[in-house]
Each structure stands twice: as C-alpha cells, then as structure tokens.
Image: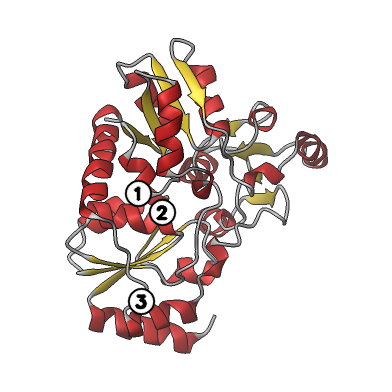
Amino acid sequence: MDNNFIERINKLKQERNAVIVAHMYQNDEVQAVADMVGDSYALSKYCTNRPESTIVFCGVDFMAESAKILSPEKTVLIPVADAGCPMADMITAEQLREFKKQYPGYAVATYINSSAAVKAESDVIVTSSNALKVIRGMEEKNIIFGPDRNLGSFIAKQCPEKNIVLWDGFCPTHHKIKKEDVLEIKEKYPNAELLVHPECTPDVTELADYAGSTKGIIDYATASESKEFIIGTEVGVMYQLKKNNPDKKFYIMSCELVCHNMKKTTLESIVNCLEKGEHKIYVPDEVAKKAKKALDRMLELGK
C-alpha cells in the first residue's frame, strides 16, 4: 500500500471536510482508508449522520446517487466518473414506465441497484438485506420487481401470497457462478459452508447453506461455529471476512468473481477526487424527491 497516497488522503480529508465511504467490493487498499465500509444503502445512511460537508463515495454511480438523495445539502463525489453498474444499466426510467403500462395497478418494488431516475418511477426500494421483509409488508399483492430477476425470484419463492412479475435483469459477476462449479468446490471442501448472494441464479442459491446480502454473508460467517466457508459473491468481500475472522478459512468460488467497475477506484483516484473536487453527483430535484419517497417507504416497511 502506498503510504504517500494514504498521507495525502488523510490530509485532504481534513482540508476538504470530507468523509470517505467504501463498498465491500472495493479494492483492499480502498477499504483500508475508508471511514466506513459496508453495503450501499448502509453507507448512504451513515453519511446522513456525519458532520462533514463532502462525501467521497468509493463505489459505483447508483450508490453515490443514493447518498446525494439522502444528503442533498452535501457535496457527493465519486472518484471514478465511469464506475457504473451493468445490472442498473439494464433498465431505464422510460423502459420501466412502458413496462408498468402492461401491468396496470401493479406496485413497483425496485432493487437499490438502480439509477435515481428508475427509483423515482418506483413505489418502494429494497436492498438484498431487507427485500423479503419489505415485500411481505407491502399491502399490494401484485408487484413488479426489478431489475434483478434472481433476487426477485429468491424473494418470490418465499412470498407465495404475492404475484410478482420480474424484470429480466441480472448481475454479470454473480452469473459467473454455475451449479456445476458449486458442486465441484463443495466436493473439494466438504466441511465448508456455502455462503452466496441472492443475485446468484436460483440453482446456485438452492445449494447454499446461507443466501444473503454482502453484510449478511460477513455476519453469518462471523457468528457461525464453522471454520471453513466457500464464498459465492464478489471477491472484494474477502478482505472484511478475513479481517473479522482471522481464525477461519475462506475459499472464493472463483477468481473470476470480479466487478471491474468496483475495482476502478484506486488510492490515486481518491487523491485526485479530493484535490480537484471531482466528480460531483447531481440528481435533479424532482427525481430526488420521488426517489426519496420510495426509499422512505422502504424504511417504513423494513422496520
């Protein structure tokens, strides 16, 4: 790790009155310099209670947008302008509006991995941590769920009382995990528990000992009496798993489980971001207002 960059980051943080947050899929050195590491929504909530006037969000664009929606009075910067999310890009606000016309009267539950514009077209937002509770708590029976069909399918199986229509989106990184690969690695490590993200395909989550959010995977591994775990999510989570559980062994499902957009952020890009005040996140007021309404409903249902 470059100590020169770290010193400059710490100095610039003070000068710019900034807080740095990082998603768990970020590079190890980025997680190490962050004031908080976590899931996207937890990071945005964390920033609302911080006194700093500037937020440096080490993640992808939709995450930084959520931070701006929840902290409109603050300056939100993303170190790399083109750090996006392929799954979020699989649906636009216009496409969602057209899709809703096919299902009049249906409520729209949207995964937080989506643009601010798509959130603004939604009735409620969900995270991988609270999706089940939120969907169960909705008074509506007929629901459009997007953009992740795998998370939607995972929730639908547990909510047979709901009629859920799925948007056909997915996470390319989690789609790299195949059932045959799971069976092979379970045979290699027979004593290891399999922990996966519900963005994986249904035939993979069905084989898991636990399927849940990134934080859920870390919390499960920490609480479990098992000493070995097979991890089925983005490789960045290994940093926190090993840091929190030095006495346990973790095997990543595949070295190909890399979100290249998440890995674009470097210590140098954080320095440049703080020095130049780039790249600022803007969310139009009307879009932010509608998106926040959907986020607020999530909080209400997720209590």
Query: Could you tell which of marks 2 and 3 lies nearer the N-terminus?
Result: 2
Could you classify mark 2 by the number of other residues whose Cα lies within 10 Å: few (under 14), some (14-19), or many (20 or more)?
many
Cα–Cα span, label 1 and label 2? 7 Å
Q: Amino acid at mark 1?
A: Ala
Q: Provide the secondary structure element on which disc 2 rests.
A: helix
Q: Provide the secondary structure element on which disc 3 rests.
A: loop
- x 23%, y 31%: residue: 300
Name the residue carrying label 3: 278
Q: Provide the secondary structure element on which disc 1 rests.
A: helix
Could you classify mark 1 by the number of other residues whose Cα lies within 10 Å: few (under 14), some (14-19), or many (20 or more)?
many
Q: Is residue 112 visible?
A: no
Check residue 116 in the rendering and tell me which mark sits there, or answer none: 1
Query: Could you tell which of marks 1 and 3 lies nearer the N-terminus?
Result: 1
Is 248 in front, or is 17? 17
Left or right of residue 196, residue 178 in this image: right
Q: Position of residue 24 (x, y in %)?
A: 49, 56
Q: Position of residue 165 (x, y in %)?
A: 50, 22
Report the coloring of the rendering. secondary structure
Query: Could you tell which of marks 1 and 2 lies nearer the N-terminus?
Result: 2
In the image, farthest residue toward the bottom = 4
Q: Is residue 13 visible?
A: yes
Check residue 62 in the rendering and tell me which mark sits there, or answer none: 2
Contact? badges 1 and 2 (CB < 8 Å): yes
Which part of the image, by quadrant, shows the C terminus? Answer: top left
Q: Position of residue 11 (x, y in %)?
A: 31, 85
Q: Amino acid at mark 3?
A: Glu
Left or right of residue 252, residue 52 in this image: left
The mark closer to the camera, 1 or 2, is 1
Is 81 in front, or is 156? 81
Is 161 in front, or is 246? 161
Height in image: 212 above or below 233? above
Cα–Cα span, label 2 and label 3? 16 Å
